[in-house]
Amino acid sequence: MSGDATTGAGDARSGLDERAAARRLDDLAARIAAANRAYFQDDAPDITDAAYDALKRELLALEARFPHLVKPDSPTAQIGAEPAEGFSKITHAERMLSLANAFDAADVADFVTAIRRYLGLATDAPLSLTAEPKIDGLSLSLRYEEGRLISAATRGDGETGENVTANARTIAQIPQRIAGAPAVLEVRGEVYMSHADFAALNARQSASGGKIFANPRNAAAGSLRQLDAEITRARPLKFFAYGWGQLSAPLASTQSDAIARLAAMGFPTNPWMRRCDTLEAMLAHYAQIEDQRAMLGYDIDGVVYKIDDLALQARLGLRSTTPRWAIAHKFPAQLAWTRLEAIDIQVGRTGALSPVARLAPVTVGGVVVSNATLHNEDYIAGRDARGGPIRDGKDIRVGDWVQVYRAGDVIPKIADVDLSRRPADAQPFVFPTHCPECGSEALREEGDAVRRCTGGLICPAQAVEKLKHFVSRAAFDIEGLGARQVEAFYTDGWIKEPADIFELRAKFGSGLQQLRNREGWGEKSAQNLFDAIDDRRRIGLGRVIFALGIRHVGEVAANDLARHFTSWRAFIDCVERASLEPAAHAPDARARKPLLPQSPAWAEITGIDGIGEAVALALTSTLSQVAERASIDRLIAHLDVQAPPARASSGSPVVGLTVVFTGTLEKMTRAEAKARAESLGAKVAGSVSAKTDLLIAGPGAGSKAAKAAELGIRIIDEDGWLTLIKGIDAANGPGDG
Ligand code: IVH
């Protein structure tokens, strides 16, 4: 979309004759459709909300003046972008994961050390890893059955992706048929566009008045995710295979040999992959790749290290979103200088006041940046959380020249300020002590870097942000109900809290009269929305917990909680019990710790792998607020909350069992045993109780074994355990899924 979307915004254009009005209507419709696509399909809004609203307003005003010119497909009769008939979905046979990041050599060293510790390997025992460029494109999973390409899917949320089979078939580098492959083979890799092809594409787009892409990755994503595969065919996409998903038979016993096999089958693989036997060799190869970066002809944003031995990969296994056996070593951020034009304060869903830098637009690593985060008031003032100086104590003022950087995908940040260019009249920034949205006092708790609005549910900004979070992709993800619609519904008073979403259909009755009259809604779109909402009444526990938008409870923590509790009732009961303990509302987590060392509900929550005190405190303090809890109860009444599927548990004989490890384990470390058992659907407890199903006792087992014997609990040794879980080891072998 061209950058002049605001031209004509708010312009009454009163002098327009009918022909000019018709032309302007077409133009507006095209602009709005393009903005919708960028927003809803590409997740990359390319105009501001204000500019979008101005286009919409102008369109509505013109349609009101020339009603006979209104087209049935006018954007005022649609919600969002294309209706449901976008791409169909494909559920990945093995999840598509992302990678943990390392930002310097010390992080890489820590990664290797942690792996050695996990595997119980001495520091001098041999351990090889592969090192290869991290391609800056988008990941694609190709499924071959009996040597034929049968489907291709984007990563999506890791569980389900978009079916882009027709598009993938147009990419010359992707073989349609392969020889010498296992009956089922999922090849995973990165689709990307070379620098030369990107420049040529943009030149063609510019000549034909088409969309100009900001960088090769956007161009690759935009080209692959085309509903019309013929457009994809015309775009020069390339592919590197770097891994695999489901396999009916192993490809090899090492990562490097498996990739070599894929190369032999005809897949492009990256020539810069090396096997490294030491940390020094890994870092040297990183340096070499970084050195070559500008000459490669395509974008990379780091180096990926993977454990070479696939049996070790299998032992290391997966965390919730990343494998333990790989890490991405990112290149340092890209930098640029520009002028800070203003500092705005945004209010988030937990009430946090976040300062945002409005910048004179500047290109940083191929992307135009005009906003950056300023973190919090201390950051602006030039001090860290403990009062020590950052940027040598230099504060940031409106009018300053600031250094902006981007590291990978993250929001741009401000690294430095050039005092020699500071305007003489620049004033220190005064951080507001009241919420700019609702006027409530904004307070900073001791030990918290962030100032928060105390308005709670009365603060419209918090309410809207909570609702946006509620409908976001990893939460309820309701088709046709995105951030923009939620905002409009909130403003109109139709949705004030999540429960209201599920009452919309009933509220508006079968006539849908009011909704139909509303800007942008037709009967069909409203009906589709209600159906999409109904689809989400049945929903997984992890999504529900995440959707509540509780501080510190991200997607990973929410899923950890869901796997542990498996039902809403069990979860909320436990949180309730933990909140009822005396001092549960102590504002400071550190204050309550010595008071309640034994609280069983608290111990249960903090005993969950990955859940710490901050999460437990956020859960108890949020869910014990009367208004908040009532609002959540109203929501739950509309839902049929589903237990999470046990992970990798098909055929697992230990799914649902509570197991305890005791004594010395000889074939695996304790951490590995625990992670493996959990990945097979067992619960691992620290002590023996009547709930224990199985005790795995190694040499030196003491009181736990005695207690288990007393309680009549089944006791096996390490070999017995390994035999028990053996069959499933193979089925859950390594891979990138
Ligand atoms: S391995 C199990 N190798 O980076 C994880 N990923 O940040 C499998 N990527 O989603 C990833 N180049 O799209 C791997 N050489 C490479 C890669 C690579 C690019 C992408 C991939 C992944 C993302 C994670």
Image: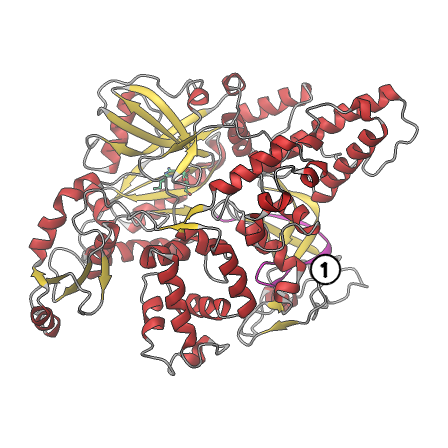
Can see residue 214?
Answer: no
Quarter of the figure with residue 262: top left
State the extent of the magenta-drawn residues as a range.
332-354
Can see residue 593?
Answer: yes
Work out which quarter of the rendered image holds the N terminus and state it. top right
Location of ligand 1 given as a quarter of the image? top left
Q: Residue at x 25, y 35 (%)?
A: 256
Figure check: 699 above or below 17: below
Q: Residue at x 28, y 57 (%)?
A: 113
Identify the residue position indicated by label 1 in the image: 420
- Decide which of 124, 177 is in the foreground and name it: 177
Q: Residues within 10 Å of mark 1 (few under 14, many from 20)?
A: few
Quarter of the figure with residue 462: bottom right
Q: Residue at x 36, y 80 (%)?
A: 596
Q: Please state the horizontal and vertical placement of residue 500, each as a whole percent of the image.
A: 58, 52
Q: Residue at x 48, y 29 (%)?
A: 297
- Could you tell me the amino acid type at mark 1? Ser
Quarter of the figure with residue 687: bottom left
Residue 96 lies left or right of residue 222; in this view the side is left
Q: Please state the horizontal and vertical placement of residue 679, each as a whole percent of the image.
A: 25, 50
